[in-house]
Image (spheres, rainbow, N blue to C red):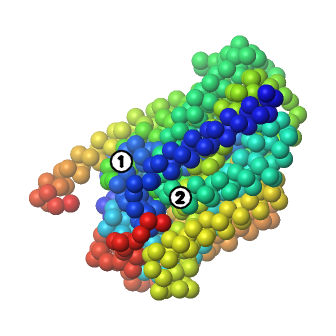
Amino acid sequence: MKRPSLGALLLGLIPFAATCFSVALWDRVYPMVFGLPFNFFWLIAWLLLTPLCMWGAYRLEISRDSKSNRAQGGAS
Amino acid sequence: MSPTIVALSLISAIVATGSLVGFVARSHRKMDLEQWTVGGRGFGLVLVWLLMAGEIYTTFTFLGASGWAYSRGGPVLYILGYLPLMYVISFYILPPIWDAGRKHGLQTQADFFEVRYGSLFLAAFVALVGVVCLIPYLQMQITGLGLIVEVASYGAIGHTPAMIVAFALVAAFVFVSGVRGVAWASIVKDLLLLFAAVFVGFAVPRMYFGGIGPMFAVLAQAKPLHLVMPGATKDLGHSWYITSVLLSSFGCYMWPQFFAASFTARSGKVLRRNAVIMPLYGITMPLMFIVGLCAVLVLPGMSNGDLSLLTMVRKSFPAWFLGVVGGAGALTAMVAAAIQLLAGATLYAKNLWRPIVAPRMTDQQVAGLAKVMVLILTSGALFFAIHSSTSLVSLLLAGYAGVAQLFPGVVLGLFSRRVTTAGVSVGLVTGLSIAIFLMMTGQDPYRGLNAGFIALCVNFATTGLVSFLTPVRVPAFDEAVPSISASQPSKEAPTA
């Protein structure tokens, strides 16, 4: 199978870095944001930011697909 | 009318409505194996979204998440961590899985292994792993249903009879509706769940503390350690968080029912778009945590945290509202269980029984056997649900540890030409053995790491090493000619 492009993979790594590997940095109660403990706020924010990253990855993959289709004369 | 009758009759009405929607949705279609299991591969964005949400936001969302927020505190955040990440993973793996599915007529996860690795036995083993891991998942739904009826009846109906009645309903529902009916029933369930979660999540903290912010302010004063990891536990710290989030996000689409759901899509593009928007739906999850955390302050000392949400609702609202929330929860459990049963039963009949025991079965007979399996699997899960008392999240984690061991075989099968059948088989067996050993001997987490994740790492390493040492015998998907030993959908199979 065709592998995903490097750009799309890097965009997907951003949420992993932000919500998984960096846990020690954001797992704290203060400062509270919008009345939420910081760790809750941070993860909720990434529920909204992850689709943004993946939307970028989607655009990249779509444009790559249409390019490779044209290169092969429309055959996929 | 007594509150018990009000609450219970509302729950029944909601369950009946949901089942009716599912029944109507299937009534004009011929039900052959292809239609029953993968909906004829014609689902667009909305139906796939509903089906996937139906599976992912289950009773666990409702009761398990609030239960862990109540009993464990900070570690519950792992759920919020893995939710968006599993969709990130799905963005990369589901479209190629769908491609392979269309090209080779795949209907189940084990079909994928059969075609990619050219081994009926590996496929049968994968089916076995899937079916066995589904049982704790099913048990989770049954236990959840039992809790709902128990609380809604104010203790008048014990949860054992409640579970038995509920699951007779589920089995009947799966029999008649197939995957399309289930997807439509989950519309009813999604609307209710969304309404109930948003309303309860905002109203409960408002009633007792004047809002979510003030509630957290009180909790941060009274129990600051409950809000961060490891919370009320000793060993669920940051390394556990990282490994559990990774295991769950890698493992999630290895559940046979999620894997098979991707075959229902009309195109790979639908799946990619789905992966982009799905994390937004997770916004209801923190609301469930909040209800559990309110219960920490309002109802301290409950022995079963999984009851915290329902007990808070019962304490704070009139009986009819408990009925609505209970109905949403019950329908959620039914829809999720139906999808799991459908996937498990098909896997068993198609990939385990037919190739190993009765190679001459027709698709029609396979569909018949799958229905018998629905009954057997339901009874099995019911048996375990009655005889064990593990928390909902722990059940989920145990299933994940097993099913995630299929990840190397899937990912390498898609993107590597060098991976071999022997490599994947040895890796899978090694990973499973380690996971089972660590869990059975009570060593999960092991030195602060999720046991399933340790097993997955060893699995990957073994798969790589053995693949390196053995020759490639089966062509990768994009090299293979579309042929199929996995069955052709029969054209004139009669209505089931």
Where residue A45 sits: x, y (%)?
A: 52, 29
User: In the image, what residue occupies the spot 71% across and 64% down?
Assistant: B379
Q: Indicate whether B385 appears above or below B298.
A: below
Which residue reaches farthest left?
A73
Q: Nearer the viewer, residue B209 or A4?
A: B209
Q: Chain of mark 1?
A: B
> Type of residue at label 1?
Gly
Secondary structure at numbered mark 1: loop
- Mark 1 and mark 2 in contact (Cβ < 8 Å)? no
Q: Residue B68: x and y, percent?
A: 73, 40
Q: Is residue B158 left or right of residue B414?
A: right
State the quadrant of the N terminus of chain B: top right
Q: Secondary structure at mark 2?
A: helix
Marks 2 and 1, Cα distance to the nearest angstrom? 22 Å
Q: On the image, numbered disc 1 is attached to which residue?
A: B44
Residue B176, numbered circle: 2
Residue at 47% from the left image edge and 48% from the top image edge: B24
- Residue B46 spot, x, y in % from top left: 40, 42
| Number of other residues with Cα within 10 Å of mark 2, as a class: few under 14, some 14 to 19, many 20 or more | some
Residue B453 vs residue B331, the one in the foreground: B331
Image quadrant in which you'd find residue B305: top right
**Left or right of A6, for residue B180:** right
Residue kind at label 2, given as amino acid type: Val
B153 relative to B121, above or below: above
* Closer to us: B156 or A24: B156
Residue B290, visible in the rendered structure:
yes
